[in-house]
Amino acid sequence: MSCEKHKEVVEKYEGTLQELAEDIGDLHYRELAKFLSHLNMKIYSDGCKDFGRGREKLSSELTKASTDLSNAGNHIYKAWKISEPFMWKIYEDIEACELLTGFFYAFFTYLLKRFLCRII
């Protein structure tokens, strides 16, 4: 039996597993629900593969874990729907700031280029 596929660390992540959990937990609930859905499907897929390999006990536990992840995702999605009306105001404010920042950046970049062209 080989465990080469299953790693002890997340190679694309520099932090600890605790930090990873905290970072994932800090996602917007909508994105966290999507993450849990992806994780659910991955674990379910692994369970199906193990069932096909005759590992019925392992498959059963992975399928149960998949169900629990699905339930967790559903609860997080409900939390998103509760908080969603309050989030759009924040998004609107952020978008306005990004638009203003983009405008000022473009404007000052233009002025700086004109100024530098004159002295060079």
Image (cartoon, rainbow, N blue to C red):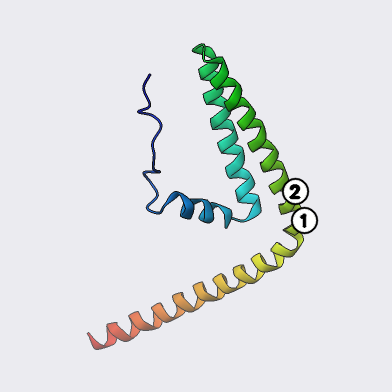
Q: Quadrant of the N terminus?
A: top left
Label 1, secondary structure: give it: helix
Depth check: give the residue in front, 81 or 54: 54
- How would you rate the neighbour count of disc 2 (Cα within 10 Å): few for under 14, some for 14-19, many for 20 or more? some
Label 2, secondary structure: give it: helix
Say which residue label 1 marks: 82
Amino acid type, label 1: Ile
Image quadrant assignment for residue 28: bottom right
In the image, taking residue 93 as reference, residue 116 lies left or right, namely left
Could you tell me which residue is drawn at 51 percent across and 18 percent down? 50
Residue at mark 2 to residue at mark 1: CA–CA distance:
6 Å
Residue extending farthest front: 57
Residue 49 in the image: state x and y as whole percent: 51, 19
Could you tell me which residue is drawn at 61 percent across and 72 percent down? 96
Could you tell me which residue is drawn at 28 percent across and 87 percent down? 118
In the image, taking residue 74 as reference, residue 63 lies left or right, namely left
Question: Does the CB distance between marks 2 and 1 fall below 8 Å?
Answer: yes
Relative to 113, does residue 77 appear above or below in the rendering?
A: above
Say which residue label 2 marks: 78
Residue 18 in the image: state x and y as whole percent: 48, 52
